[in-house]
Image (cartoon, rainbow, N blue to C red):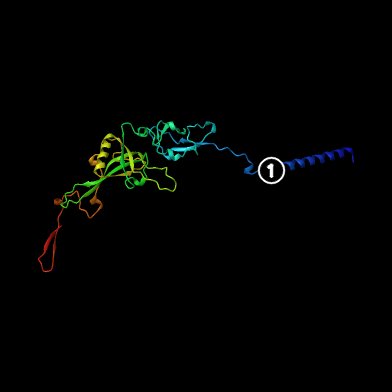
Amino acid sequence: MSARMIILLVVALVAAGATTMMVRNWIAAERAAANVGPRDLAPVPQLPEVLVAVDNMPAGMVLKPEHMRWQPILETTVSPEHFVKGQVNQQDLVGSVVRQSIAKGEPLIPARIVRPGDRGFLAAILTPGMRAVTVPINMTSGIAGLIFPGDRVDLILTHAIDTTEESKRERRASETVLYNVRILATDQRTDFEEGTPGQPAKTVTLEVNPKQAEVIAMVSELGRLALSLRSIKSEEGALAEDANAVGPIPRAERTYTLDSEVSALLPDARVKKDQRKEREILVLRGGQAPQPVTY
């Protein structure tokens, strides 16, 4: 064998060995990378989250849960005025009023909102020219505590009415005296401890104009008030939809219900006794002459 062939054979063996070593090293590196678990990876830092506005919030708007959301931001941009998740409960801001308009996506800060109990809360929430009036309610008349600031209600008055009955039986009626009135605040507490029953509201504060305030003061003396919750969606053709209308609802447009409409045992209070149709029947008692009976 010539020296040239021997040299070529040696070079081929060295190249094959080097290739084998490279392949082994590559396979070992791939296996090591595949065996790396989540615990071996560096933890991703969690960004702080602050409360921001879901949409544009005009001044006077009452905050509800759907108006706010948590949004992560860089830790370096967090301000002491921000409401940071873990440091504040979002539910604590429900019922607050926007003092100055807040743009969509803008963080909420205390200077832009007025929280219930703060000085100037009612003044901030009141529409210019309107008044705040508080009326008493209970579990039944207050819709079982399911009314909240920002909701709109109708006011229903139930009271005794004059009757033409000779027996002077007390008759009752209910009528809707005000429509589409905005709830400003309730005295219901939501910060009770877990496991203890919540306390339903005993009073509710309404936003009305000066004439409507006089109406509420009067109907509170006439009988019992009840609230009727309205849908959040506006109704087309609804009666007296404008809450700023002056005075009570006109008599011709007002709805009412008499006790005789819900009980078939009571005579119609709208019909005088001398106007009612009388019928006569004959009652036969043994051998006596027939005795007419009018009813």
Amino acid type of the residue that numbered disc 1 sits on in the rendered structure: Ala
Taking the spot 13% from the left edge, 60% from the top edge, the residue there is 293
Residue toward you, 265 or 126: 126
In the rendered view, does 115 fall on the left or right side of 209?
right
Picture quadrant of residue 131: top left
Q: Quadrant of the C terminus?
A: bottom left
Judge by depth and name the residue closer to the eye, 230 or 171: 171
Residue 129 in picture, x, y percent from top left: 31, 31
Can residue 248 be spotted in the picture? no
Residue 111, above or below 176:
above
Q: Residue at x 79, y 41 (%)?
A: 17
Please, is residue 169 above or below residue 237 in the view?
Answer: below
Q: What element does badge 1 sit on?
A: helix
Q: Residue at x 27, y 34 (%)?
A: 210
Farthest bottom residue? 287
Whole-percent x, y for residue 193 in the image: 44, 45
For label 1, the crowd category at 10 Å Cα-Cα, with few meaning under 14, some 14 to 19 and many 20 or more, is few
The picture places residue 68, in percent across and down from the top left corner, at: 45, 37
Single out the residue that lies furthest toward the left.
289
Q: Tell me: residue 185, above or below residue 262.
A: above
Q: Is residue 259 left or right of residue 18?
A: left
Query: Where's the N terminus, which quadrant?
Result: top right
What residue is drawn where x is 73% and y is 41%? Answer: 25
Residue under label 1 = 32
Q: In this orientation, does residue 251 appear? A: yes
Image quadrant of residue 37? top right
Q: Position of residue 251 (x, y in %)?
A: 23, 41
Which one is in front, 200 or 282? 200
Horizontal side of 26 relative to 108 (left or right) equals right
Say whether residue 125 is left or right of residue 218: right
Nearest the eye: 186 or 207: 186
